[in-house]
Image (cartoon, rainbow, N blue to C red):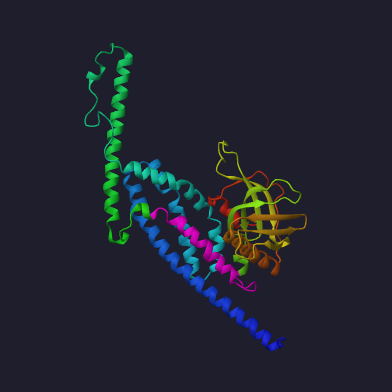
Amino acid sequence: MLLQPAAAVNTVEEQRARWEWKRSRTAKELVKTEQKYLEQLDLVTTYFVAILKAKGTLQPGVREAIFGVLESIHYSSQILLLHLERGHLGLGLKGFCQKLELYGHYAENLEQAKKTLQILRIRKWNCLWISGPPSLKILAGIPSSPVALLLFIALMAAWTSSREQLKKNKSFCRFKKLQESRPEFLGWQLEDLLPLPLQRLHEYKYLFRDLMENTSPDCAEFQHLARRWYIQEGWLMEVPAKGEEVKRKMFFLFSDILVATKPCHPLHPLNSDKFACQAVYPLNQCTLDKVFGHTQSQGGLLSLIFPHKTLLLMSSNQEDINNWYLNLTTAIRRLQARPTPVHQKEDLTEQPVSSTEAPTVQEMCQDF
């Protein structure tokens, strides 16, 4: 039965009302969780970073190894929350996307931060002379010479340095325990708080996606939200059209493009843990179809048709192929519902990208 014009209008209005309700709910959740996140970052920047910097308990290099760019992340979240609380959602997210690179640097440093904290927790050093300076007796049997004197001086310097470092380690351990005992920490330890930025980044992914999906293209905020953002990444098998060998590639899905990459050489001095870009496919020119995988089978095959190429992407994981299909469908539908120009870089090949650094995350929120 065909809908009458009035009924059709009512249906559209009802859909817009549902979108607005979901969008409002997500916006409130974003503000509430951002406030909580900022409170937790405050604990680290106020009771650890600022005090350690003022007291000089740790050498700058050691302090940097533990906290990295946490202060910059804290500041960017303060600015974001300020915009969110004033209702400037789109403006806040636009500025925040320009700072996402900080999360990549922080992620790269987190493992080093954990190792540094483990080293600082060691209270006893396996040094034979830690209880006292080296004695001239250790030179017994060594012919008296300038070399022997230099050896003794070197040992004295090593003992002095080790003893001083031990004092600083013990001082830091006492300081850390004291700060963690504050009621504001609610039993959290520094090790529990350091991973928070990466956990929050994972939450941003779903909150921002929900905001975008429930924001009408006619909304003033849409232009701020509708820039490039990261959606999904994962390994897929590319099935060639002419019987060539199936190739396993890492794909990165953004709001307007699909990026195909291959791992950099494992012996590369700088990019061994990154991926080299092989191709960039604009989604506003894509027609998507699920060739098979409609039932609860073992995986599926997706067909992505572009003006000058057809991609056949396969996965043996049913849930994985369903997620790719859903996210690709949503991204393509939104782009084609309101076409926007997407400018491609001419030279994108062989540019290394990483699957974990936010790094590349800044590019996720910018146009080509």
Between 305 and 155, the one nearer to me in the picture:
305
Answer left or right for 261 relative to 191: right
Q: Could you tell me residue 90's position as x and y percent?
A: 56, 67
Count of numbered tags: 0
Between 10 and 219, the one nearer to me in the picture:
10
Q: Could you tell me residue 119's position as x and y percent?
A: 34, 41
Identify which residue is drawn at 33% across, 51% down: 51
Answer left or right for 37 relative to 158: right
Question: Image height check: is 45 above or below 155?
Answer: below
Q: Which residues are magenta?
A: 193-221
Between 347 and 86, the one nearer to me in the picture:
347
Q: Residue furthest right?
A: 308
Q: Quarter of the image holding residue 64?
A: top left
Answer yes or no: is residue 230 visible: no
Answer left or right for 105 relative to 324: left
State the predominant SS element of the stretch in magenta: helix
Question: Image height check: is 158 above or below 176?
Answer: above
Between 224 and 40, the one nearer to me in the picture:
40
Answer yes or no: is residue 166 visible: yes
Identify which residue is drawn at 56% across, 69% down: 211
Q: Is residue 205 magenta?
A: yes
Answer left or right for 133 relative to 355: left
Q: Is residue 200 magenta?
A: yes
Identify which residue is drawn at 51% across, 62% down: 204
Q: Could you tell me residue 139's position as x and y percent?
A: 26, 17
Query: Dividing the image into 4 quarters, which one contains the N terminus?
Result: bottom right
Query: Dividing the image into 4 quarters, which one contains the C terminus?
Result: bottom right
Q: Could you tell me residue 328's position as x and y percent?
A: 64, 62
